[in-house]
Image (cartoon, rainbow, N blue to C red):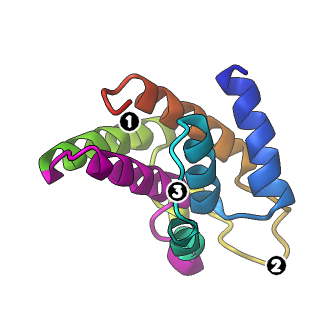
């Protein structure tokens, strides 16, 4: 399955059907995409990474991605300098592509009950394409 089809299918599953937040969705999708199982506690830890508890701070899309990168790199015995460098690179590309790293900017409507369902789905699709491409073109796998 190509990346576009994978992203669309898994976004619909995790984000829309299972109602995972952005960080949970990214972690689940990257775990599947790169065949790197994650402990359920990692997914549970991402539960509050929806703009940092809806405070509209750090976006869960980037948070989930850097959590995944850190876990994979650590499992390979990579040092913190490597982890910092690869996550810095992703943050830089994400920021340039989407104009921010925080929900306050990326989701200006905030978290309100009258928001349409899955308001971040278009952003999530684009972000996952960027994240997967970044990881595939890194030396992480």
Q: Closer to the camera: disc 3 or disc 2?
A: 3
Q: Main secondary structure of the magenta part?
A: helix
Label 1 Cα crowd, 10 Å radius (few <14 / some 14-19 / many 20+): some
Residue 74 lies, with reference to residue 55, above or below; the image says above
Q: Nearer the viewer, residue 23 or 29?
A: 29
Residue 67, position as x, y percentages in the image: 41, 57
Q: Quadrant of residue 85?
A: top left
Residues tagged 3 and 2 counted as in contact (Cβ below 8 A)? no
Residue under numbered circle 1 = 93
Quadrant of the image for the C terminus?
Answer: top left
Q: Secondary structure at mark 2?
A: loop
Between 50 and 42, the one nearer to me in the picture: 42
Magenta span = 52-80
Camera sees residue 101: no
Whichever of callouts 3 and 2 sits on the residue coming sooner in the sequence is 3
C-alpha span from label 3 to label 1: 25 Å
Left or right: 66 as drawn, with respect to 51? left
Q: Quadrant of residue 107?
A: bottom right
Name which quarter of the figure residue 20 lies in: bottom right
């Amino acid at each position: 399955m190509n990346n576009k089809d994978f992203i669309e299918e898994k976004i619909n599953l995790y984000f829309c059907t299972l109602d995972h937040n952005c960080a949970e969705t990214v972690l689940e999708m990257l775990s599947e995409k790169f065949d790197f199982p994650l402990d359920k506690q990692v997914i549970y830890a991402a539960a509050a990474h929806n703009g940092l508890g809806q405070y509209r701070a750090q976006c869960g899309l980037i948070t989930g991605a850097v959590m995944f990168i850190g876990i994979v790199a650590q499992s390979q015995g990579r040092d913190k300098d490597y982890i910092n460098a690869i996550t810095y690179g992703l943050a830089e590309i994400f920021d340039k592509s989407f104009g921010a790293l925080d929900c306050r900017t990326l989701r200006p409507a905030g978290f309100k009950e009258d928001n349409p369902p899955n308001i971040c789905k278009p952003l999530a699709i684009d972000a996952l394409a960027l994240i997967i491409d970044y990881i595939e073109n890194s030396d992480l796998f």
